[in-house]
Image (cartoon, rainbow, N blue to C red):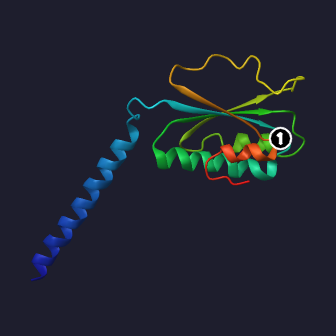
Amino acid sequence: MVVHMGWILLGYVMAALLVHLSYGRLRRQPPENSGRTHYILVTRNHGDQMEWYLRALSWYARIRGESVKVTVLDEYSQDDTRRIVQRLRNQPGIELALRSWRASGDAGMSGSGALAEEETLIYVDLRKPQEAAKIPYVQV
């Protein structure tokens, strides 16, 4: 009887190992024909909220299995905003870039560069409190 229980336990362990290996292999493959979402976050002195925003985007990317690119345009913050972004650069699920940005007279982005063909651009000006609602899992 002990031998039979050992075989049953070994079968469960092997099945669990096979599931984990298959899942890990599946996660390493890029999603098929799904475009990447590119969030552009314009910020100034948002150190208190920046970590939550970036972690929410990382969770969103991992849960949805999508590729998310985040560019933080920092308008010369005087708090820890830049340091927080630097620390979270290796967050799984997102490609993170930090740029210094001086706002001109208009609220639009000038010189933002070319977007990839299948990239969806979401512009979030965090200097306006209601704009943060565009970030998944963030409520204003």
Residue assigned mark 1: 127
Q: Position of residue 48 (x, y in %)?
A: 80, 53
The secondary element bearing badge 1 is classed as loop
Q: Is residue 23 left or right of residue 39?
A: left
Q: Residue furthest front?
A: 130
- Residue placed most toward the observer, 137 or 99: 137
Q: Residue at x 32, y 54 (%)?
A: 20
Q: Is residue 139 left or right of residue 74?
A: left
* The N terminus lies in quadrant: bottom left
Q: Is residue 1 left or right of residue 117?
A: left
Question: In the picture, residue 96 is in which quadrant?
Answer: top right
Q: Position of residue 95 (x, y in %)?
A: 59, 34
Q: Position of residue 38 (x, y in %)?
A: 60, 32
Q: Residue at x 86, y 27 (%)?
A: 103
Q: Residue at x 34, y 42 (%)?
A: 26
Question: In the picture, residue 98 is in which quadrant?
Answer: top right
